[in-house]
């Protein structure tokens, strides 16, 4: 791409305090911390699939990094370095400046350095690879849930899905409600501090990107266990609670994507430690059920009766 070097220099060459060598050479040079494992994750966002092509580039900059940081959070890893493979249709300086601004704002807030990448011309597509560090034996893996564990979830469920439903005209929200829920959809807050704090207390963890049931389902499958959840304990915001009678309510809360909260399991005696973490971080942490040895996911209503779990999460290549 003509002007590629100029573009990289102008928009993607801010200081990289945590790298031995950052943007500009054939490779970045990184010094891992003794006693840690590297946690590496890649996510691609494609225009028209994961975001609207005319999406606010500043928010896109934030979100494209935030969803990757959410994977580090779900592993209990500390964010360290990120690379950016950017495919853009043309050299739109205003777009690039705003995208970089959002990306670097999220990076600064989470102490991660952009150390390299690639820039090509084509349909708008954004791929980030994040690298974090986690103490040996400290990672929160999906295969570590055990029968008897309590199932926890951070924050609230369904905010992002209701924001999307409102944008598509399927739900009526007032302006203040829409603004609050839209922020949850467009500027998710990765639960990095929570993931790191849970290293000692939790067994298995995952971030909720495809919907709570689907993502908890990954923990259950990988750990070879099942779960019983109490429908009444699922945490929802006041705004979503006001939509309790809406036909989309269950789908948004149980299977809505894009919340980027953490779902994790921990032994029952870890409850005081987990409550203390929630208070320290000012983050709602809710026990929603428990892990059992028998496979499957059972949802109980307020009277302890079985509820059908027909709703599954979003799958890119599967049926909804
Ligand atoms: P090469 O041809 O060796 O792959 P490039 O011309 O692709 O090098 O990139 C030059 C330098 O700029 C490299 O250090 C690379 O990591 C960095 N870089 C390229 N694109 C980006 C980007 N979008 N964001 C951050 N760094 C980038
Ligand atoms: Mg290159």
Image: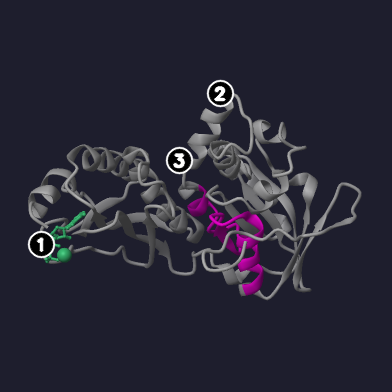
Residue on which disc 2 sits: 176
Residue on which disc 3 sits: 186
- Residue 20 lies, with reference to residue 220, above or below; the image says above
293 sits left or right of 200 in the view: right
| Mark 1, other Cα within 10 Å: few <14 / some 14–19 / many ≥20 | few
SS for callout 1: loop
Q: Residue at 46% across / 49% down in the picture?
A: 192
Q: Residue at 62% across / 57% down in the picture?
A: 264
Residue range of the region highlighted in magenta in the rendering? 194-221
Q: Is mark 2 within 8 Å of ligand 1?
A: no
SS for callout 2: helix
Q: Is the residue under label 1 in contact with that under label 2 (CB below 8 Å)? A: no
Q: Residue at 81% across / 59% down in the picture?
A: 308
Magenta-span inclusion, residue 214: yes
Q: Is mark 1 within 8 Å of ligand 1?
A: yes
Q: Nearer the viewer, residue 159 or 124?
A: 124
Q: Quadrant of residue 100?
A: top left
Residue on which disc 1 sits: 25
How many numbered discs?
3
Where residue 53 sits in the image (x, y, percent)? 36, 46
- Residue 108 lies, with reference to residue 86, above or below; the image says above
Q: Residue furthest bottom?
A: 224
């Amino acid at each position: 791409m003509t002007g590629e070097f100029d573009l990289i220099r102008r928009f993607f060459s801010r200081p990289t305090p945590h790298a031995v060598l950052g943007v500009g050479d054939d490779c970045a040079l990184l010094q891992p911390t003794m006693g840690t494992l590297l946690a590496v994750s890649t996510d691609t966002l494609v225009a028209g699939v994961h975001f609207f092509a005319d999406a606010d580039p500043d928010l896109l900059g934030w979100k494209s990094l935030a969803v990757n940081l959410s994977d580090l959070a779900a592993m209990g890893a500390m964010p360290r370095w990120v690379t950016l493979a950017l495919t853009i249709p043309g050299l739109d300086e205003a777009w690039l400046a705003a995208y970089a601004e959002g990306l670097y704002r999220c990076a600064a807030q989470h102490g991660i350095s952009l150390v390299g990448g690639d820039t090509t011309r084509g349909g708008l597509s954004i791929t980030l690879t994040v690298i974090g560090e986690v103490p040996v034996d400290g990672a929160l893996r999906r295969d570590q849930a055990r029968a008897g564990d309590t199932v926890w979830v951070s924050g609230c469920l369904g905010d992002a899905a209701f924001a999307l439903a409102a944008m598509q005209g399927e739900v009526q929200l007032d302006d203040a409600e829409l603004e609050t829920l839209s922020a949850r959809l467009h500027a998710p807050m990765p639960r990095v501090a929570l993931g790191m704090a849970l290293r000692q207390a939790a067994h298995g963890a995952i971030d909720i990107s495809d919907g709570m049931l689907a993502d908890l389902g990954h923990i259950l499958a990988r750990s070879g266990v099942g779960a019983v959840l109490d429908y009444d304990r699922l945490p929802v915001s006041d705004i979503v609670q006001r939509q309790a009678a809406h036909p989309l309510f269950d789908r948004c809360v149980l299977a809505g994507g894009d919340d980027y909260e953490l779902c994790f399991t921990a032994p029952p005696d870890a409850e005081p430690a987990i409550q203390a973490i929630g208070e320290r971080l000012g983050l709602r942490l809710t026990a929603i059920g428990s892990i059992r040895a028998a496979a499957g996911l059972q949802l109980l209503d307020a009277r302890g009766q079985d509820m059908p779990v027909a709703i599954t999460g979003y799958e890119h290549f599967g049926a909804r």
